[in-house]
Image (cartoon, rainbow, N blue to C red):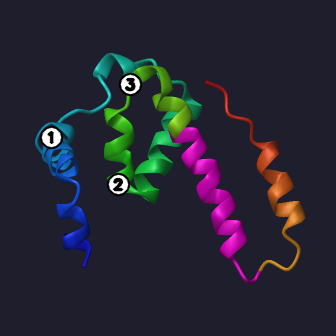
Amino acid sequence: MELVRCLGHPEEFYNLFRFRIGGKWKVIAKKDQDSLSSSLETCYQYLNQASRSFTAVVQTIGTEIRHAVCIFYLVLRALDTLEDDMTIMEKGPAITQLSLFPLRT
């Protein structure tokens, strides 16, 4: 069924092909990696641990928004994890503690 829906959008095949061919070699440039703050380095390490496929997508984004996308993904992933965790009886304090760790770029 999924294949039938994809056939209705041939431009997606082109974009997927372009990403698979060129996207997997495009990574954060060495000079950009050297200039990352320790907080951003930690963010990218967590991003790689959380989702390798999304890491590849983030690395293809332009430099002006790459860091913001990385940070927002991690924050939303943390909130989603808190929301899905049925063992947390009172979620308010756990969510409040997220603000105790400000990220500096």
Which amino acid, by three-letter code, is at mark 1? Answer: Arg
Quadrant location, the N terminus: bottom left
Foreground label between 1 and 3: 1
In which quarter of the view is residue 45 placed? Answer: top left
Question: Which residue has dot 3 on it?
Answer: 62
Disc 1/disc 3 C-alpha distance (Å): 16 Å
Q: Residue furthest front?
A: 8
Please say if 11 is above or below 82. Answer: above
Q: Are marks 1 and 3 in contact (CB under 8 Å)?
A: no
Residue at the spot 49% in from the left edge and 26% down from the top edge: 65
The magenta stretch is: 70-87
> Tag 1: Cα neighbours inside 10 Å, few (<14), some, or many (≥20)?
few
The tag on residue 88 is: none
Residue 82 in magenta? yes
Q: Is residue 73 left or right of residue 7?
A: right
Task: Assign a secondary structure to mark 2.
Answer: helix
> Tag 3: Cα neighbours inside 10 Å, few (<14), some, or many (≥20)?
few
Image location of residue 68, percent across then percent down: 56, 32
> Tag 2: Cα neighbours inside 10 Å, few (<14), some, or many (≥20)?
few
Foreground label between 2 and 3: 3
Foreground label between 2 and 1: 1
Which amino acid, by three-letter code, is at mark 3? Answer: Gly
Helix, strand or loop for the magenta stretch, by majority: helix
Image location of residue 48, percent across then percent down: 40, 50
Please say if 41 is above or below 31. Answer: below
The tag on residue 52 is: 2
Disc 2/disc 3 C-alpha distance (Å): 18 Å
Question: Which residue has dot 1 on it?
Answer: 18
Q: Is residue 56 left or right of residue 82?
A: left
